Image: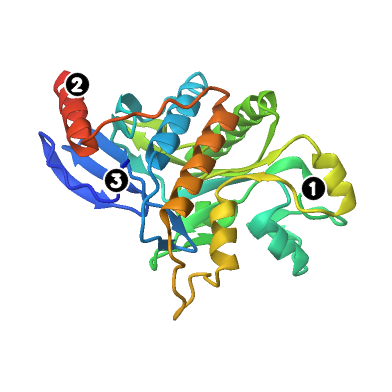
Amino acid sequence: MEAIVKTDFNFPGQTGHYVGKVRDVYSIGNDYLVMVVSDRISAFDVVLPKGVPFKGQVLNQIAAKFLDATTDILPNWKIAVPDPMVTVGHKCEPFKVEMVIRGYLSGHAWRDYKAGKRTICGVEMPEGMVENQKFPQPIITPTTKAAEGHDEDISKEEIIAQGIVSKEDYEQLEAYTRAIFQRGTEIAAKMGLILVDTKYEFGKKDGQIYLMDEIHTPDSSRYFYAEGYEERLAAGEKQKQLSKEFVREWLMANGFQGQEGQQVPEMTEEIVSGITERYVELYENIVGEKFEKAEGNDILARIEKNVTECLASL
């Protein structure tokens, strides 16, 4: 099965084409976006040399399910999923902040905490916490896109003072972030999972706030298995994660952490199919349904046909 690592479509009405690390986004006039979720895989800010078959489908379909599960909270950009690897939706003006919400002291927040910091993005963290412990209340730690392209922590107060987002809009984004995270937490719990932390992007169209991009996929979210969580926490052991952490671990075990002069280890067919299997497992664990592989000899032709038909119907 071929992995889709590059797309170069020319859809009817296309006015722009942006290539991200994993997603290829096509602008259709001022109204619509076509987001193709490729099979590229990135780790340590590097896109690995080989793609992973079905990874794009896994991420696109998880995101679609969670977007559909939050439409009663606020509208989102998704209009249709015309192909297993594609979402077509509204083109919005994005807010220049990412809303990161953390239910547990993990990752970047834990690294800061361990170094002695007790505030992150202007939010106080209680004394005496241990890694992966649950916060009394989830905390919102926004980031802003810096000019150089990496995300930087910023406080609510700075966002409003600098006029990045108005006070009124920001407070609405906070309320939406908490509500969506609560919904994601409830859905995860039914699957025996803990939604640890995640990030959301929002935009505006015709004065209305929309949820954008993807939500609650293993690329944007960290999940723990609920079973054994308390025992591991008490014993000071690492939690069992459901994320793409296994890819980073494989790279590190083979001497690669994205630093200069380091070589990406050889991605044999065996390694690649192993990563596909793990992504399928992520899908089935998060969604709770069997993953149906979208077969096809010419995936690019399939995507082009499906998207063209969808755009004609808008």
Q: Position of residue 16 (x, y in %)?
A: 17, 47
Q: Which residue is mark 2?
A: 314
Q: Nearer the viewer, residue 196 or 54?
A: 54
State the separation of the CA atoms marked 1 and 3: 39 Å
- In the drawing, what numbered circle is on residue 16? none
- Please identify, in this view, whether the residue under mark 1 or under mark 3 is nearer the observer: 3
Q: Which residue is mark 3?
A: 4
Few, some or many residues within 10 Å of mark 2 (<14, 14–19, 20+): few
Sequence-first tag of 1 and 3: 3
How many numbered marks are there? 3
- Please identify, in this view, whether the residue under mark 3 or under mark 2 is nearer the observer: 3
Q: Amino acid at mark 3?
A: Ile
Q: Nearer the viewer, residue 165 or 108?
A: 108
Q: Nearer the viewer, residue 130 or 208?
A: 130
Where disc 3 sits, the SS reads: loop
Q: Which residue is mark 1?
A: 133
Where disc 2 sits, the SS reads: loop
Here the colouring is rainbow
Q: Amino acid at mark 2?
A: Leu
In the shown orientation, is residue 18 left or right of residue 194? left
